[in-house]
Amino acid sequence: MGLTSLIWFLLIGLIAGWLAGQVMKGGGYGIIGDMIVGVIGALIGGWLFGQLGIAAGGLLGSIITAFVGAVILIFLLRVIRRA
């Protein structure tokens, strides 16, 4: 992975993490926390979409994939926190 790809991956993770934090009504986790949630969400979303046979290409598709994964991650974190 080149430097440019890494920067895009982190930027997409930041956007997806921030969007997921806003949608899940808990606020964000700060810039670093949002980036971590978004990057882990991108991995979860990529795996999930692959299992379902869904292909999302391009920048918008990457953001949507990461966003879906980040929402799932935040949901799971909140379920675990309540237990």
Image: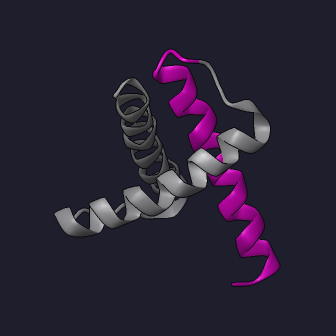
Horizontal side of residue 19 vs 78, given as left or right: right
Q: Quadrant of residue 21?
A: top right
76 in relation to 8, above or below: above
On the image, the x and y values in percent for residue 34 come to 66, 39
Q: Is residue 28 magenta?
A: no
Residue depicted at 46% across the width and 22% down the height: 24
Seen from this angle, which residue lies furthest right? 3
Residue toward you, 67 or 74:
74
Q: Is residue 3 magenta?
A: yes
Main SS of residues in magenta: helix
**Where does the C terminus fall, quadrant-wise?**
top left
**Where does the N terminus fall, quadrant-wise?**
bottom right
Q: Quadrant of residue 10?
A: bottom right
Residue depicted at 52% across the width and 49% down the height: 63
On the image, the x and y values in percent for residue 11 come to 71, 53
82 in relation to 11, above or below: above
Horizontal side of residue 81 vs 8, given as left or right: left
39 in relation to 81, above or below: below
On the image, the x and y values in percent for residue 25 come to 50, 15
Q: How many marks?
A: 0
Residue depicted at 56% across the width and 21% down the height: 22
Horizontal side of residue 46 vs 27, given as left or right: left
On the image, the x and y values in percent for residue 67 come to 47, 43
Seen from this angle, which residue lies furthest left? 52
Seen from this angle, which residue lies furthest front? 83
22 in relation to 39, above or below: above
Residue depicted at 78% across the width and 37% down the height: 31
Write the start and end of the magenta stretch as one range. Answer: 1-26
Seen from this angle, which residue lies furthest bottom? 1
Q: Quadrant of residue 9?
A: bottom right
